Image: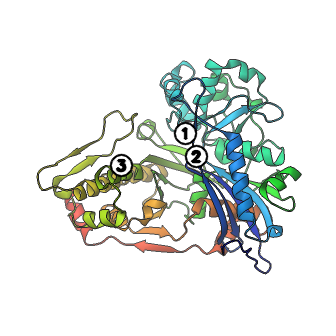
Amino acid sequence: MAGHKKIFFLSMSYVLCLDCGATNVRAMIVDDHGAIVAKSSQPNSTDAGSENPEYHVWNLDRIVSQLAECSRKAVAEVDAAQVKAVTITTFGVDGALVDKEGKLLYPVISWKCPRTAEIMANIRKYIPQGRLNEVSGVGEFAFNTIYKFIWLKEHRPELLDRAYAWLFMPNLISHRLTGQMFTDRTMAGTSQMTDLKTGTWSGEILSAIGVELGLFRPMVEAGQSLGDLLPEACGLLGLPHSVPVISTGHDTQFALFGSGVGENQPFLSSGTWEILMLRTPHAALDKEDYAAGATVEYDSRNGLLNPGLQWIASGIIEWVKSTCYHGEGYDTMDAEAAAVPPGCDGVSLIPDFLPSDPVPGCIRGLIMGRTRGHIYRAAMEALTLRLRSRLHKLEKVGGFKSRDLLLVGGGARNKVWTQMRADILGIPIRIADVSESTVLGAAMYAFAGAGVYPTPEACRDAFGITYTTVEPGPQHAEYLKIFHK
């Protein structure tokens, strides 16, 4: 971008990606060569629920207004006449009941909300948890959509009687823009109410919890049109003419695709949470896998599945930073960690920092002479060992052997940690040279849906994703001796 000057390229096409995240809402303009040529963002946060200040809900009106303001700012930087499509990505599982006009009957319950933990703990009243896992493929997470449905059923049953439809977060937004109601398939796959074998809603699960199939709008594949922008939506987004809104949906699936990851190649998105996933035609999970936190979601491409595991990661690193470093930057932290040998002179950390973790985390081995650098390196070692155990689990689930690991996200910028991953795992780490894999992945599907490219894969090839590879180094042998199991 160049200040307030518009950017014009000969015969250039753009798509507008509206990205609603838990921390920020953003509008980004991507050109047909894969460059992000304009962007705008605003902070996002939940509101307290009216029944309990500990509850978390999303303010949909505010989010739509923020996305629209961001869109107008981003669109003003380019030739808006060349915007060929709009697409929307958000976090998974969240949605709301609406009436026939699309008006919310109850606020969007956030994945952060604690109200559903008790529901999950007592799910056997409706269906055994093991059977729920077996049918849906989705792991045991209290934020899953099914537990929101049951909470509404138990606490506000009159709303289900009045409801015309359930819309997930991106489809609540797309309805505001097009007037049409659909269900992005990648969002449905996070709900724990679908059938892993058929790829459709599970009659068994819906019957068990007393929800009618008719409450869900038609399911659409990534890359399909959700309808054209309404005239008022064009003005809202700052576009001079109507364009199609192309289905994408759950941000994780498009981060996978946008990173360039191939089938049976493990992918790690490293941020506050780390999400380890795979694109594969098959995913065989058992009771032990689900107990270890495994789950299966629908890939952006029909016919592929995304088995995966997730755990808090950089959230723990940030805790170390705020507790031990008091405003000092990562350059200082990384230099101190690099000076500590593998094994941290006996200092170790158990990275279980969430209130829901059965055993609280702790730091062991602190004696005179140990430093904050030991604690920081111990945190990275603990998280990397967790990655190693989860990667072995994913290999078992997917029936493959890792040749390398594709890494994206903020955690990929930490050179000490990335080298440690290569050393402990004993395989190369490939870092995708893209800063916005979710937005780029969504743009690839939007360009294909708008007819600019014949397929999302052709668009991805045209974007030309490159990688930086970090090989196991001299400390690999030391880690083999220390963590040989």
Residue type (three-letter) at the residue carrying disc 1: Val
Per the model, the C-alpha gap separating discs 3 and 2 is 30 Å
Residue 468 percent coordinates (x, y): 46, 74
**Residue type of the residue flagged with mark 2:** Glu
User: Where 128 falls versus 246 (above or below)?
Assistant: above
Q: Which mark is residue 138?
A: 1
Q: Which of marks 1 and 3 is in front?
A: 3
Q: In this view, does 451 lie above or below 354?
A: below
| Image height of 17 relative to 56, above or below | below
Instruction: State the image quarter where residue 340 is shown.
Output: bottom left
Whole-percent x and y of residue 365? 16, 48
Q: Which residue is drawn at 22% across and 67% down?
A: 339
Task: Locate residue 221 relative to residue 49 in the image: left or right.
Answer: right
Q: Which of 4 and 458 is in front in this view?
A: 4
Task: Inspect the image, locate mark 3, and give the three-letter code of the amino acid beneath it.
Answer: Trp
Please report contact status of discs 2 and 1: CB closer than 8 Å, yes or no. yes
**Which label sits on residue 319?**
3
Q: Can residue 360 be seen in this view?
A: yes
Q: Which badge, 2 or 1, is on the more N-terminal residue? A: 1
Query: In front: 449, or 412?
Result: 412
Which of label 3 and label 2 is nearer to you? 3
Where 388 sits versus 118, above or below? Answer: below
Q: Residue at x 58, y 58 (%)?
A: 255
Neighbour tally class for label 2: few under 14, some 14-19, many 20 plus, Cα within 10 Å: many
Residue depicted at x 63% and y 28%: 149
For disc 2, the marked residue is 297
Question: How is the model colour-coded?
Answer: rainbow
Of marks 3 and 2, which one's residue comes earlier in the chain?
Answer: 2
